[in-house]
Image (cartoon, coloured by chain):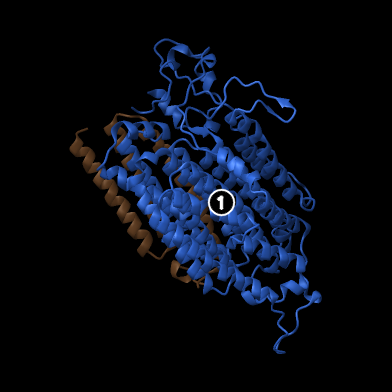
Amino acid sequence: MIASLFAQVDPSMLRGGDVTSGALNTGIVHVAGPSIDWLALLPLLILLVGGLLTLTFSSFLKTRAPKSLFTWTTVAIAVAAAISVVPMWARVQGWGSVLWWNLDQAHTGPFSTAGGAVGIDGFSLFITVVLCAGVVLAALLADGFLRRESMTGPEFYVLVLLSAVGGVIMAMSNDLIVLFIGLETLSIAVYVLAGMNLRRVQSQESGMKYFILGAFSSAFLLYGIAMLYGATGSTNFVDIRDFMSAVVPIHNGLLLVGLVLVLVGLAFKISAVPFHAWSPDVYDGAPTPATAWMASGVKAAAVAGLVRVFMLTFSNYSSTWKPIVYVLAILSMVVGAALAIVQSNVKRMLAYSSISHAGFILMAIQANSANGITAAAFYVAVYTFMVAGSFGVATIVGRKGDGNHQLSDYKGLVRSNPWLAGSFIVMLLAQAGVPFTAGFFAKFLAITAAADAHAVPLAIIAMVSAVISAFLYLRIIVAMFMSGGDDGTEDVVDRSNRLRVPFAAGLAIGICVVVTVGYGIFPDLLLQPARNATPAAVQYERPTDSLSLGAAGSSTGSTTAGR
Amino acid sequence: MGSNLSLAYLMLSAILFVIGGVGVLIRRNPLVMIMCVELMLNAVNLSFVTFGKMLDDISGQIIVFFVMVVAAAEVVVGLALIVAMARRRPGATADDLRTLRG
């Protein structure tokens, strides 16, 4: 029973867990802390410690930091975190060796650690890598942007790293409370990111709006968690799953309301209609690299949360939540695409199109099948690159002050910056789902998953809304081709109006284009990992060899938390 | 604790949650809005404790500490955002946040 106490504890707080259990005085309850597989938490720790160290050391710098120091530090931290996923991925997939490194592994397959608080499986590792990619892209985009806006300093990078920590916690969570803590870690950092540009009143406004609505929705999520806890007697995913399969509560009002409230909280984060009202305003007002992170990282983490709660924990209760997700998916796809068309601001257009993309991901989730999980994982990975690249172009076109985001500001971009415009065209076509781009396969997988799950009307609506949103992307492309001199009233845009593309931002956009097109031509490269990215609910097992210290106390330690 | 009493606590928590929720929606002062969000979170805390008691499970009470920490962190950021806004536009309410629309 007491061990269940520790099952809720954030792993980073338990460093001394096994040491305290050594106090074997009779009459005192011996508590053995949960064993923690530090290697499994390495991606999380690298991001966290990296972010905190960056912040600490930057305050020791006597003079101004060398140009782009923090950018490349952040990129290095994120890449290191992504690399540290590889041994765990090998263990989960049961590989014998990675490249030249021969792995001698006693245990293979997914497992859970830190007292059952986190689950390491294919899905969590996949999303972790996606989040690391999002961090790299956001940091590269921020480099030139922050210098242009005179906001140089480590804050932006540290906040992105810390919010990525929250995202990784969400992706790895095996407990509703861990999920909540991850979501808050992610969100609180992003509230600050949105309101960071103190010179722009719009940035403050977007930070404030995001904060109030985000905190409001978090309260709903938390109330839902409380109700699920009351209904099932645990917050642990594995225990809830066991409870659900043992009891099959058909008319349990508490459970139903709890599930709906959790869905509301997570749907807010992926900005599904009707919980989308914040996203165009916030995307528009936030500094553009922060918007890129919000659209890629935050959405990926929230999708991970949805998959873990609904497709993993409540998968055999799907008759209840499927219809709700079905309706959310339809509304998001159609409303997102339709409202995007009437916008004149490119950032708002992209915000509405990201609502539409959220609908496609929800469609994959409502399939509630292995194909659905593959489709959601693939979609999230591809979408991260497409949307980060798109907002990357918006970052550069925004010019000094980050205010030029009207459709007219893109006029003649094909003539003044052919490479930039070409990249943008690729990214927009990929978002529209044109073949030979990764966006096509993402949409294809999501629609196939829905059709396989006998949701044919949903699949048809998805295709129709894809056509509607194609119009929106073409509108931006056409704007870029207009030179402004055709009717003789405006100055002709030519090479002299060229926008300077900072090296790091160019690199980020280049990566996005290469990945989008590369996975469009060789989708198997991403499809194979996405197929292996299955979430798993594994009961936490206390390793027997770690019991040398408080053996008496820890024998009760297997986490059948609470029941 | 009798089940009637537990039910009463759950009802109280639901009522507090609704008061907080309505407060966020109708009050225009950002500071009061943050207070209402805090009220919602604390109403949920009451639910957690009650459920923990009903289930005879300690984790319901442990969770409350985590929620408190999260709520504190949230307030810190919220107040910072309000201060930044108040410096630029003294006396601004939520209704003044309307440069972004469309």
Image quadrant in which the C terminus of chain A is located: top left
Query: In the picture provided, is B68 more to the left or to the right than A437?
Result: left
User: Residue lying farthest top?
Assistant: A26
The answer to whether A127 is drawn above or below residue A36 in the figure is below
Q: Which residue is pictured at 39% across the width and 38% down the height?
A: B64
> Is B42 or A297 nearer to us in this picture?
A297
Query: Toward which corner of the image does residue A277 lie, by quadrant?
Result: bottom left
In this picture, residue A418 sits left or right of residue A335 = right
Image mark 1: chain: A
Crowd tier of the residue under label 1, counting other residues whose Cα lies within 10 Å: few below 14, some 14–19, many 20 or above: many
In this view of the protein, which residue sits in the foreground, A76 or B26? A76
Where does the N terminus of chain A fall, quadrant-wise?
top left
In the visual, does A310 lie left or right of A163? left
Could you tell me residue A165's position as x and y percent? 58, 42
Say which colour chain B has. brown
Q: Quadrant of residue A240?
A: top left
Residue at 60 percent across and 37 percent down: it is A44
Task: Return the residue nearer the eye: A130 or A58.
Answer: A130
Please tell me the colour of chain A. blue
From where the camera sits, is residue A236 visible? yes
Q: Which residue is mark 1?
A: A379
Q: x, y percentage for residue A371?
A: 50, 44
- Residue A291 in percent (x, y) is at 59, 59
Amino acid, disc 1: Tyr
Residue B21 placement, left or right of A442:
left
Q: Position of residue A373 (x, y in %)?
A: 50, 44
Placement of A41 over or under A459, stated as above or below: above
Which residue is found at the position 73% from the left and 31% from the top?
A: A99
